[in-house]
Image: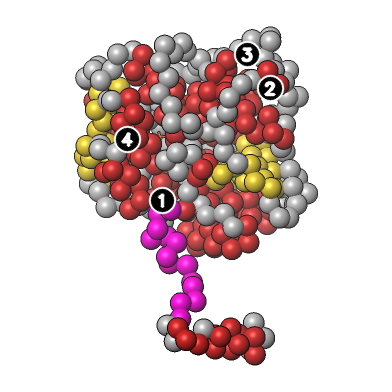
Amino acid sequence: MEISVKLPPSFSFSKLKGRGVWRYSEAIAGNYRKVITINEGGTPLIKGKVGEVYYKFEGANPTGSFKDRGMTVAISSAVNEGYKIVIAASTGNTAASAAAYSARAGLRIYLVLPKDKVAIGKIAQAVLYGATILEVEGSFDVGMKAVMKLYKDMGIVYPLNSFNPWRLEGQKTIAYEIAEEIRVPDFVFVPVGNAGNIYAIWKGFTELRDAGIIDKIPRMIGVQAEGASPIAKAIVNNLDTPQFVENPETIATAIRIGKPVNWRKAMKAIKESQGTAVYVSDSEIVEAQKELARTEGIGAEPASVASFAGYKKAIQEGLVDKSSEVVIVLTGHALKDPDSMIKSSARRILVNPDHLENVILGDLNAGN
Ligand SMILES: Cc1ncc(COP(=O)(O)O)c(C=O)c1O
Ligand SMILES: N[C@@H](CCOP(=O)(O)O)C(=O)O
C-alpha cells in the first residue's frame, strides 16, 4: 500500500514549529489523538571538508538510527488503533527502535531476529528496552516471511516493519529536513536493505515538488552490499525485477537482506528520479568506514557507511561529478556495531607511564 499525501496550499517551512519528525505533522498522513515520541529526527546535516558533500547523520536519533523516524509514526498509529501487541523482523536497528518506542507506549513487543547475525549493540538495546527476542536460523528474510504470515493469520498483532506505510511516512521527513536546510541537492545516496527508506526519502521530495516548495527532486542513488544486492544488480543490468538472493552475506549485517519487501517501491523511486544504484564490496565498506571516521570525524556502522562507499564508487565510475551537490545519508551510529570498529588498524602501545614523551619524541624523530 502507498499513502498519497498532498500538502495544504498554506504549507511553508517558515511557518513550522518545533523540531524533528513532528515539525512536519501537516505532511504526515493520519490523525493522531496521542503521539508517541522520543524527540526523533532533527538530525545534523554535516558539511564535508571537501566539495559540496553533506552527511545526513541519522546516528543522532534516540536509538541511533533512522528507524526512529518511522517508529514514532507507526507506534502512534498502533496506539491510536488500539493495538496492545506489536512485532517486527529485524537485522537489528528496527528491533532496537521498535523496542524503545513500544516501551514508551506500554506495548508488548516480539522481535524476530536472525540468530547470531545481529550486531551486539543492537541486541543489547533490544534487551535493555525489555523486548521478547525470537531467534530464527537463516537470514532476516526467514523472519520477515514469518512476520508477514503472522500478521495475515493473527489480526491482533501490529507489524512494525516498513511494509507498514506509516513507517515510511515518518522516514520521509529526512527529505523535508534536507529541503528545509539546503533545498535540493543533485544526488542523495542511501544504503538499501529492505528498501523502504530510499522510497520514503524520494516520496518526501516528491510531495514538496508537487506542492511547489522545491522545483525538482534529487536523483536517488541506492547502494547495496555486493553479497546482498538484488535491487542494485537489477538496476545495473536494466532488469524490471530483481533476482532475490537466497543466502545474502555481508559484514554490513543491517542490510544483509536477500528479498527486500519494498523492492518495487525502491525501484520506482530510483527510476522516477532518474537515479541509479551501485553495489560495494565488504572491503570497500570497511575502508569507507575508516576514511569517514578518520577524515570527517563521523562514526557510522558498516551498513550506514555503504552510502559513502557508494558515493566513492560513483565518482570512480563517472556516474557523479566531484563538483555535484550530494547528500550522503548515514543511517546508523558506529556504536551499534563495536566489533566492526575494533577491527580497524590502531596504534595501541604499552607504555611506561613516567615516560609518555618517549613515544611522542620517537614519532617526531621518525618524522611522523
Ligand atoms: C543502518 C541501516 N542502514 C540502512 C538500512 C536499509 O534501510 P531499508 O531497509 O529501508 O532499505 C538498514 C535496514 O535495513 C539499516 O539498519
Ligand atoms: N535493517 C532493517 C531490516 C528491516 O527493515 P524495515 O525497515 O522493514 O523494518 C532492520 O534494522 O531490521
Q: Measured along the vertical axis of the image, is residue 100 above or below residue 156? A: below
Kindly state the secondary structure of the residue where label 2 is placed: helix
Foreground tag (2 vs 3): 2
Q: How is the image coloured?
A: secondary structure
If you read the primary sequence from the N terminus, does the residue marked by circle 4 or circle 2 appear first?
2
Foreground tag (4 vs 3): 4
- Which is more toward the observer, 96 or 256? 96
Kindly state the secondary structure of the residue where label 3 is placed: loop
Q: Which residue is drawn at 64% across and 10% down?
A: 8
Amino acid on which the number 4 mark rests in the picture: Ala
Kindly state the secondary structure of the residue where label 1 is placed: helix
If you read the primary sequence from the N terminus, does the residue marked by circle 1 or circle 4 appear first?
4
Q: Measured along the vertical axis of the image, is residue 15 above or below residue 314? A: above
* Range drawn in magenta: 335-349
Q: Position of residue 73 (x, y in %)?
A: 44, 23
Residue carrying label 1? 336
Query: How packed is label 3: few (under 14 Cα within 10 Å), some, or many (20 or more)?
Result: some
Amino acid on which the number 3 mark rests in the picture: Leu
Q: Quick check: marks 2 and 3 in contact, CB under 8 Å?
A: no
Residue carrying label 3? 7
